[in-house]
């Protein structure tokens, strides 16, 4: 017997909703998850399917695979689309952090990790003899973005609805003396909504770049905006970029839709000491919505 299309779609939607909302015991009873405490394991390994490296500010998912004595391989939920609960595993990390779903994250400031290698150790509390180690090298061939745009304006308030008109009088249905009903009264016009607030202008942005020498030279970039003497208005960010494969796009769009110029200058490193010479990519007063730094 064929199942109508509408019923099939309804069943699929219900199954998808149940998989998202079902608690752990329900998922185990339905066979969607396998508790490791009840599973014999011969080996375990950790991988980064979107790796093998991580960039400052990036988040990448970790996948853990276990092999049973019969050769069957089980993987973690989430990116691994498997049956292993993350709460059945213990993650110890160096340099990176890991959330409850096995997603690794590295600090966006490259000064926190420059010259180091991140590391992840996976253990199974119910199987203390098992352990998987994974080194996570750093990469800088990443499309970075820095947004120093002004804030959006506030939304205007809605207008009020107009009042309803009055009902007309009922006509007579007497066959000897029929009469039409009276006209109803007109409703009143609604009031106009108030105007939204203007967006704020973007602050001026300065981008300083220097080359970090080595076997594989990298660009050290500092991006700052606003007056650092004005509390609450200045912003600053640092980047380490591969000049061959990486990029940095800086945006500074004001609330009126016109950005402020980005000023590029010579720079000697993370200490922000400027060289004696500097240059600007835009003449004074010339709007530049974004400045792109790429070799």
Image: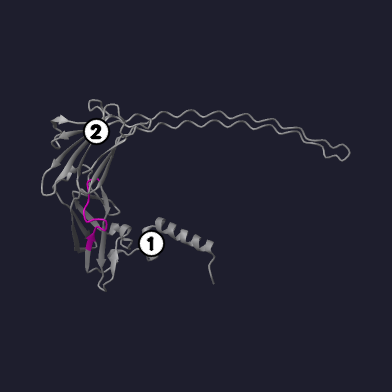
Tell me where residue 221 appears, x and y as whole percent.
Answer: 19, 39
Which region of the structure is painted magenta?
45-57
Residue 204, located in which quarter of the rendered image? top left
Instruction: Using the image, determine if residue 246 lies above or below residue 265.
Output: below
Residue wearing tag 1:
27
Question: Which residue sits at x=62%, y=31%?
Answer: 163
What is the number of callouts on the image?
2
Instruction: Please tell me the numbered disc located at residue 281.
Output: 2
Q: Nearer the viewer, residue 98 or 2?
A: 2
Specify few, some or many for label 2: CA neighbours under 10 Å numbering under 14, 14-19, or 20 or more.
few
| Marked residue nearer the N-terminal end (1 or 2) | 1
Instruction: Using the image, determine if residue 204 lies above or below residue 245.
Output: above
Secondary element at image label 2? loop
Q: Is residue 52 left or right of residue 23?
A: left
Do labels 1 and 2 touch, CB within 8 Å? no
Tell me where residue 232 appears, x and y as whole percent.
Answer: 28, 29
Furthest residue to the bottom?
A: 70
Question: Which residue sits at x=53%, y=70%?
Answer: 2
On the question of residue 177 being in view, the answer is yes
On the question of residue 124 being in view, the answer is no
Q: Nearer the viewer, residue 56 or 88?
A: 56
Q: Quadrant of the N terminus?
A: bottom right
Tell me where residue 63 appears, x and y as whole percent.
Answer: 27, 59
Residue 273, located in which quarter of the rendered image? top left
């Amino acid at each position: 017997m064929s199942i109508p299309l509408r019923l099939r779609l309804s069943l699929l939607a219900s199954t998808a909703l149940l998989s998202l909302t079902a608690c752990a015991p329900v998922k185990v009873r339905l066979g969607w998850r396998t508790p490791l405490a009840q599973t014999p394991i011969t080996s375990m390994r950790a991988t980064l399917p979107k790796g093998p490296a991580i960039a400052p500010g990036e988040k990448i998912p970790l996948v853990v695979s276990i092999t049973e004595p019969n050769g069957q391989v089980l993987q973690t939920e989430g990116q691994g689309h498997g049956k292993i609960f993350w709460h059945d595993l213990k993650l110890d990390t160096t340099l990176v952090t890991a959330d409850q779903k096995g997603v690794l994250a590295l600090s966006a400031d490259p000064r926190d990790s420059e010259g180091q290698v991140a590391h992840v150790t996976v253990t199974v509390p119910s199987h203390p003899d098992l352990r998987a180690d994974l080194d996570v090298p750093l990469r800088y061939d990443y499309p970075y973005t820095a947004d120093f745009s002004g804030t959006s304006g506030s939304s205007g308030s809605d207008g009020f609805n107009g009042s309803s008109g009055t009902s007309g009088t009922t006509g007579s249905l007497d066959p000897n003396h029929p009469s039409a009903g009276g006209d109803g009264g007109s409703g009143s016009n609604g009031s106009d909504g108030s105007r939204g607030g203007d967006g704020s202008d973007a602050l001026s942005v300065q981008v300083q770049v220097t080359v970090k020498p080595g076997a594989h030279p990298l660009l050290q970039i500092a991006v700052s905006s606003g007056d650092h003497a004005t509390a609450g208005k200045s912003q600053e960010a640092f980047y380490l970029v591969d000049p061959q494969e990486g990029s940095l796009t800086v945006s500074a769009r004001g609330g009126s839709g016109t950005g402020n110029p980005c000023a590029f200058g010579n720079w000697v490193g993370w200490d922000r000491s400027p060289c004696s010479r500097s240059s600007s990519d835009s003449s004074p007063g010339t709007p530049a919505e974004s400045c792109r730094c790429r070799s």
